[in-house]
Image (cartoon, rainbow, N blue to C red):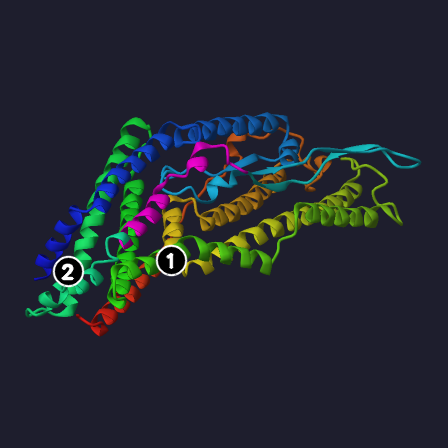
Amino acid sequence: MIRQIAKKEIHHNLTTLRFALMVILLPVLFIVNALIYSFGSGGYAMQMDNYNRRGTENRDHVIKYADQSLAELALVGPGEMRKRPSRLMFCAGGVDEVVSRSIKMKSEGTISRSGGGKDEDYKWRSPLKLEYKVESASGAPTTRVKINWVFIGVLMSFFAILFTFDTIAEERASGTLSLMMSNTISRGQVLLGKYLGAFVTLMVPLIISILMNLLIIYVLGDIPFGTSEWLRILAMVGLFALLVSIFIFLGLFFSSRVSNAITSLVWLLLTWVFLAFVFPSLLGTFVGNLNPIPSVDEISMRRRAQLDQIDDEWKEGENKLKKAPAIEYPSRTRTWAEYFTAIGDTEKQIADQHIDQQLRQVQLARDLTQISPIATFQYAMEGFANTSIAGYMDFVKQARRYRQTFIDFVKAEDQGDPESLHIYPVREGLSQKPVNPDVVPVFEERISYRNVLSQVGLLVLFNLLFFVLAQVSFLMSEIK
């Protein structure tokens, strides 16, 4: 009997205008998505070209300074740590659209100190620091249009309520529901049959459109997919199914609670708008006002004040920095090393704290907005596409570990030179001999998808919750 009800629902849906609209709109959106991300200036091919070009430039940078000396390489730094463009960026742009995919470890340049009296002239490089850059990508077609799988998923949740808002209310008003229930069939079977009918009606055109999208990208877009990408795409199709299922249950809930289809549609539209747009925006504003982040100017002023304080401490009294460091004077060189270390620690603390505050605020806002299944779907899609805020936070942590790995390498390599003073991070205290660039550690990004499991679990819980609500509501509703 469940199969007969499902077939009846499918046949009814196929004859509606909303179904015609869906089967026209979905392929168009997926084809546009494939063309934008295959051939657009912000697509994967262009980003990979840029990634490879900058990788070559970074390698040339390391070779150039390694050939000069270990000391020069240690002070200039290894250059950029780059986040590899995601092959699934057409599914979810995520934070890759608003932050730089590279973190630079570099010195800000040469600082000069003019001698006076007994002071000596000296030029030195500022200590290495990580540069976290936030950039606007509003000019790229991928962010200007934003027709990705997340956008289409939101649209599918809208279609889910269009196909279910009248499925019970209209049959109750026409008397069809009471006629159906006069047979030996339970309400649970009726609800399950209607659910399956709506689910098949929505998912079959969606899957066909997805296959068209993947075919264009794979054949024309020159985006190679490996086993990992195919498994993640399959997982994303599962996310579509979970989201569609949630809103089908939501539609069945309202359709069984109200007396007519128009009232059901109004309540569903209000709920959908609230979950998709209003609720995430309000919570984002609330979190931003609850814990405001210092502005760039405030951070700059704080940094300058702390660095000035360090300069005053090291230049007053005994004039510790009166004499320039030299290989012939180890104690003087160690004094400068202590001064540079103090500056480097301050720079690192300020920069790391600022980006950590920003990322924690974004993460908190996203954690709160996961009360909305649409937001949860978006974050899960970004997680599988490796464009999520959690993925970027992992990238930052890996960049910091690489910073320490590079410093440890410099110190270890320096120990092999008996002529060096082994004093880091002063040029005169490190080896003046060239170093083999092939032994310089290279940054490699490691990707983890463990953070996605919580979002998938939430979508499953949403399904169970709305299923129970729809079932209880239908059991308690009047047939006539």
Which residue lies under the disc numbered 2? 193
Q: Main secondary structure of the magenta part?
A: helix
Classify mark 1: helix, strand or loop: helix
**Would you say residue 396 is visible in this rendering?**
yes
At x 84%, y 32%, the residue is 121
Q: Is residue 306 left or right of residue 476?
A: right
Bin the neighbour count of mark 2 within 10 Å (Cα to Cα): few under 14, some 14-19, many 20 and up: many
At x 30%, y 37%, the residue is 30
Classify mark 2: helix, strand or loop: helix
Q: Looking at the picture, how far across and down is residue 151, in whole percent?
A: 37, 44
Is residue 410 covered in magenta?
A: no
Q: Looking at the picture, how far across and down is residue 65, in whole percent?
A: 61, 28
Q: Looking at the picture, how far across and down is residue 423, in whole percent?
A: 70, 42
Which residue lies under the disc numbered 1? 270
At x 19%, y 45%, the residue is 204
Q: Is residue 227 above or below residue 356?
A: above
Q: Amino acid at mark 2?
A: Gly
Residue sitting nearer the eye, 434 or 151:
151
Q: Is residue 125 left or right of residue 249?
A: right
Q: Amino acid at mark 1?
A: Leu
Segment tinted magenta in the rendering: 136-161
Residue sitting nearer the eye, 330 or 454:
454
> Which quarter shows the N terminus?
bottom left
- Marks 1 and 2, how far apart at CA: 26 Å
